[in-house]
Image: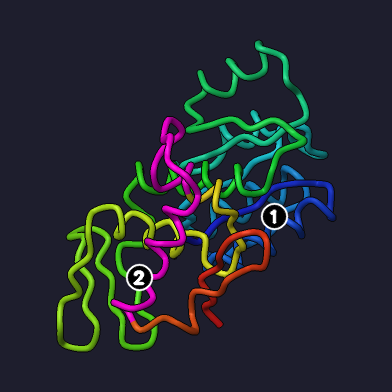
């Protein structure tokens, strides 16, 4: 998984972001001001930096100019168009405005990591080995015969491991925003994944919500 630097001066927000990054399998480092962020970013290679704009010491834009190249998502309460354009013109990969849903932040982080080819490419759990690049799955020494949609659902569960996802969210992430099917479709595909992978105890049903891939 990815190693991510979280630069946010609000300690509570910083901790919540880091907790959720850890839940989905990423490692992280924390900085609470601009000077500390520059120091960490020059001493350690990060796969992604989540960078607040309004920071003590140095603002996020100044930090961005001083650090070695790394994918960056600006996180800020400033929602003015000029501020967004400034961040993107500097070369940031994305920009998200507070308050935000944690799933949205995680999804944007995953999208940037996929583009920069530094995200998860393989995943192993119990007897299951998943190769994201080749889109193949082995259970023990045998290949599992997954349909394209089953694999996409599996990938969503892996990239959001230990997070409870509603059926609607799974439809959105695996089938796309314009999918017009019913949430029962998710249940059918989940049952097939459980059976084919032997993950009856790994893919947990969350009562009245959806499912979670438990990796602990």
Q: Is residue 106 above or below residue 139?
A: above
Q: Quadrant of residue 16?
A: bottom right
Number of marks: 2
Magenta span includes 77: no
> Which residue was labeled with disc 1?
17
Q: Disc 1 vs disc 2: which is toward the camera? A: 2
Question: On residue 193, which mark appears?
Answer: 2
Q: Which mark is residue 105?
A: none
State the CA–CA distance, disc 1 to disc 2: 29 Å
Q: What element does badge 1 sit on?
A: helix
Q: Position of residue 208 (x, y in %)?
A: 68, 61
Near mark 1 (Cα within 10 A), the count class, few <14, some 14-19 or many ≥20, is many
Going by the image, does 163 lie left or right of 184? Answer: right
193 in relation to 72, above or below: below
Residue 194 in the magenta stretch? The answer is: yes
Q: Residue at x 39, y 43 (%)?
A: 175
- Residue at image coords 30%, 68%: 122
Whole-percent x and y of residue 62?
65, 30
Horizontal and vertical percent for residue 139? 24, 83
Of residue 131 and residue 112, the one placed in the foreground of this image is: 131
Kindly report the secondary structure that dominates the magenta region of the rendered protein.
helix
Task: Mark 1 or mark 2: name the one nearer the start of the chain.
Answer: 1
Expressed as whole percent of the image width and height from the top left, the position of residue 99 reads 77, 36
The residue that appears at 42% across and 53% down in the rendered structure is 185
Looking at the rendered structure, the secondary structure element under dot 2 is: helix
Residue at horizontal 71 percent and vertical 54 percent from the top = 31
Q: Seen in the image, is 31 located left or right of residue 128?
A: right
Q: What is the magenta range?
A: 171-197
Q: Is residue 16 above or below residue 200?
A: above
Corner quadrant of residue 67: top right
């Amino acid at each position: 998984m990815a190693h991510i630097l979280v630069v946010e001066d609000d300690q509570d927000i910083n901790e919540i972001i880091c907790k959720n990054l850890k839940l989905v399998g990423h490692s992280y480092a924390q900085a609470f001001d601009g000077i500390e962020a520059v120091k960490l970013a020059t001493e350690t290679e990060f796969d992604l930096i989540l960078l607040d704009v309004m920071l003590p010491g140095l603002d996020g834009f100044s930090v961005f100019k001083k650090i070695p190249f790394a994918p960056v998502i600006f996180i800020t309460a400033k929602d003015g168009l000029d501020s967004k354009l400034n961040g993107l013109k500097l070369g940031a990969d994305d920009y998200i405005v507070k308050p935000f849903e944690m799933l949205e932040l995680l999804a944007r982080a995953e999208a940037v990591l996929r583009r920069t080819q530094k995200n998860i490419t393989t995943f192993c759990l119990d007897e299951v080995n998943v190769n994201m690049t080749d889109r193949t799955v082995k259970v023990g020494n045998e290949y599992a015969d997954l349909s394209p949609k089953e694999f996409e659902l599996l990938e969503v569960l892996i990239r959001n491991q230990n997070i409870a996802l509603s059926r609607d969210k799974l439809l959105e992430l695996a089938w796309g925003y314009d999918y017009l099917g019913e949430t029962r479709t998710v249940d059918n595909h989940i049952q097939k994944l459980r059976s084919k992978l032997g993950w009856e105890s790994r893919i947990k049903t969350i009562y009245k919500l959806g499912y979670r891939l438990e990796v602990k």
